[in-house]
Image (tube, rainbow, N blue to C red):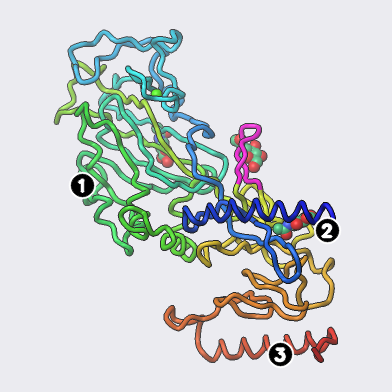
Amino acid sequence: MHLSGLLSLHTLWVTVSSSMQHYASEYGHYDVCKTLMKSDEGIVWEYMACQPESRDMTKYLKVRLEPPESTCGEPPEIFCAMGNPYMCNNECDANTPELAHPTDLMFDIEGRNPSTFWQSITWKNYPTPLHVNITLSWNKTIELTDNIAITFESGRPEQMILEKSLDYGRTWQPYQFYAADCLDAFRMEPKSVKDLTHRTVLDIICTEEYSTGYAAHAKTLSFEIKDRFAVFAGPRLHNMASLYSQLDTTKNLRDFFTVTDVRIRLLKPATGATFVDEQNLARYFYAISDIKIHGRCKCNLHANNCNFDNNKLSCECEHNTTGPDCGRCKKNYQGRQWSPGSYLTIPKGTANICIPSISSMGTNVCDNELLRCQNGGICHNNVRCQCLAAYTGILCEKLKCEKESGGCGSKSNHGARSQSSLLTLTALLALTGLFKI
Ligand SMILES: *[C@@H]1O[C@H](CO)[C@@H](O)[C@H](O)[C@H]1NC(C)=O
Ligand SMILES: *[C@@H]1O[C@H](CO)[C@@H](O)[C@H](O)[C@H]1NC(C)=O
Ligand SMILES: *[C@@H]1O[C@H](CO)[C@@H](O)[C@H](O)[C@H]1NC(C)=O
Ligand SMILES: [Ca+2]
């Protein structure tokens, strides 16, 4: 055996042992794109659906305020102590580091005391509403994987809308409404995320749970991603496989957790009372000490790494895909239409790799090196794809119609299709002169 054989055997062993460890601990985690496998034809790559790990996404965002001059301290101004409207001797001064409250203090490491925070101008123009938009942009499609949590040092706002964009800030949709009184603020019935079911999980709700004003012990406002996951994966998210298969088949569900930007629309500060105290307007403002957003780069299940280079996140695409989200096939790999990887079949999914363009293909039906069999099918003697149980078609390109899921359309249609693929297969076999095998 020569050196390259030894080397690939070693790689095989390392890959197999690490992936075994991996699959034993977590079911369907999709963190490797390929492993070396032993087969009848020798050692070959096996390709799998893959995704980058979930991480703290606040490190990679850009923040923008509307109006831009919403941060306090330019010129310096006096504000009242939070929770004590009669102690109005605090100063915000943008040009004195100890007294400044810039936006980056929403994303620094917390845990120290006192906490560091961004602070808005005060409501000195009452009764003109104090509206501030905080827009967080990644310039990259990301998938949220945990609750968004916003910590207010000022008392939580009485009215707020969390919004998202999926198109780099061109259009916006609400994610959730927050108000001390939903009917009054937004003409919406108050709801809790706990009321959501399979049917209503994507409903946009107004909640009163996070707007109880000045209570010093309750500072956090949440957008509950995990409770929504739990509708599919169970209360302790023990059945992620069920969530993944739902994500695979339901585009709306996938898109719901996908964003390029998030916007916090602050509409009314905490007042803690029915009436605004016009003698002490310096007690009303917004202050945020921390924002938590966890997610992963959306790479269409074609990458397990996402890099941050030149201030920009991008997927390290595998499976011969390319683009910031691995959203298309590489040049010369357009032998069939691009498609995202699939979480199915669980636990390894299907890579749906891009295959070489037709011009560079030979004439047999399939070829292990060029991997024309799809969805995990294996090329048998270059004439036939051996498909996994759930797939059919010459190249295993079709999902088998499951009786219980209602089939792939009307029976007659299906019959006609499979008959025509049989004809194609026969024709192909005759053409390549392999009919006698
Ligand atoms: C905040 O953004 C919304 C759209 O998401 C826009 O309608 C509104 O005018 C903005 N508010 C401010 C203060 O710029
Ligand atoms: C966003 O990313 C693209 C590349 O994907 C780049 O051309 C563009 O300049 C970036 N925009 C901003 C505002 O950084
Ligand atoms: C992608 O193409 C390169 C050659 O450009 C090849 O070495 C590699 O194995 C291919 N990967 C996949 C997943 O097909
Ligand atoms: Ca902080």
| Front: mark 3 or 2 | 2
- Residue 289 shows which numbered tag? none
The quarter holding residue 127 reads top left
Local secondary structure at mark 2: loop
Query: What is the spatial separation of the Cα atoms under label 3 and label 2, in whole angstroms?
Result: 45 Å
Residue 200 higher or lower than 134, as above or below: below
Image point 73% across, 86% down: which residue?
Answer: 424
Whether residue 101 sits left or right of residue 59 in the image: it is left
- Residue corresponding to mark 2: 1
Label 1, label 2: how far apart the Cα atoms are: 77 Å
Q: Which residue is mark 3?
A: 423
Start-end of magenta stretch: 305-316
Quarter of the image where the C terminus is located:
bottom right
Residue at x 42%, y 81% (from the top left corner): 404
Q: Which mark is residue 183?
A: 1
Give amino acid for label 3: Leu
Query: Circles 3 and 1: CB distance less than 8 Å?
Result: no
* Residue 126: x %, y % from top left: 26, 24
**Amino acid type at image mark 1:** Leu
Q: Secondary structure at mark 1?
A: helix
Q: Quadrant of the N terminus?
A: bottom right
Q: Is residue 68 above or below residue 31?
A: above
Q: Earlier in the sequence, mark 3 or mark 1?
A: 1
Q: Residue furthest left?
A: 274
Residue 282, image quadrant? top left
Q: Is residue 361 magenta?
A: no
What percent of the width, then of the height, locates residue 324? 64, 47
Q: Which image quadrant shows ligand 4?
A: top left
- Left or right of residue 349: residue 309: right
